[in-house]
């Protein structure tokens, strides 16, 4: 499931970048941040499945903390490369981080549900 999520994310991001969708539609990055959070959480479950992430950390708080850390690093990266051209960048960054956390929680719920099916 992670590979499918990652592939869809990569294809949508590539198309969005080539067609300047992030610049034409102010809202386009919002679902991408949420989808990125889902991808991060599912990635942690995948890392657990290949024994690179401890099962004991697949609880809501650690997964959300890692999602938060990745979201903060991504916003720092955007700032570093000069993406924030908006005057209300802090509000935009806050919304992006919040959506990343929401996506991370959704990914946790999906991953945990799949884990319980075994």
Image: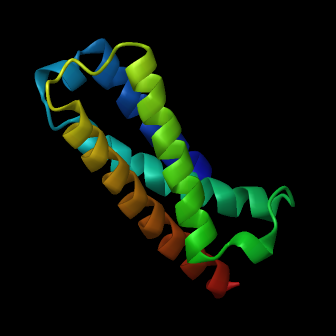
Foreground pick, 59 / 111? 59
Q: Position of residue 6 (x, y in %)?
A: 53, 42
Q: Position of residue 55 (x, y in %)?
A: 78, 73
- The structure residue drawn at horizontal position 83% and vertical position 58%, both measured from the top left corner, is 50
Against 89, residue 61 (above or below) is: below
- The structure residue drawn at horizontal position 32% and vertical position 54%, both measured from the top left corner, is 99
Against 63, residue 114 (above or below) is: below
Residue at the extreme right: 51
Residue 17's image quarter? top left
Q: Position of residue 115 (x, y in %)?
A: 66, 79
Which quadrant of the figure contains the N terminus?
bottom right
Q: Is residue 10 visible?
A: no
Foreground pick, 48 / 4? 48
Against 22, residue 112 (above or below) is: below
- The structure residue drawn at horizontal position 47% and vertical position 60%, both measured from the top left corner, is 104
Residue 13's image quarter? top left
Which quadrant of the figure contains the C terminus?
bottom right
Is 108 left or right of 90, judged from the image as shown?
A: right
Is 21 left or right of 72, judged from the image as shown?
A: left
Is 59 left or right of 35, judged from the image as shown?
A: right
- The structure residue drawn at horizontal position 63% and vertical position 53%, both measured from the top left corner, is 43
Residue 9's image quarter? top left
Q: Is residue 47 visible?
A: yes
Q: Position of residue 94 (x, y in %)?
A: 29, 47
Q: How is the image coloured?
A: rainbow
Against 15, residue 118 (above or below) is: below
* Count of labels in the image: 0
């Amino acid at each position: 499931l992670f590979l499918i999520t990652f592939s869809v994310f990569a294809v949508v991001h590539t198309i969005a970048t080539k067609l300047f969708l992030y610049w034409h539609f102010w809202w386009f990055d919002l679902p991408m941040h949420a989808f990125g959070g889902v991808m991060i959480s599912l990635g942690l479950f995948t890392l657990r499945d290949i024994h690179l992430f401890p099962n004991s950390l697949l609880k809501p708080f650690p997964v959300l903390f890692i999602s938060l850390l990745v979201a903060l690093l991504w916003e720092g990266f955007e700032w570093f490369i000069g993406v924030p051209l908006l005057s209300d960048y802090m509000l935009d960054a806050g919304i992006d981080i919040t959506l990343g956390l929401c996506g991370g929680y959704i990914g946790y719920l999906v991953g945990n549900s799949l884990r319980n099916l075994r």
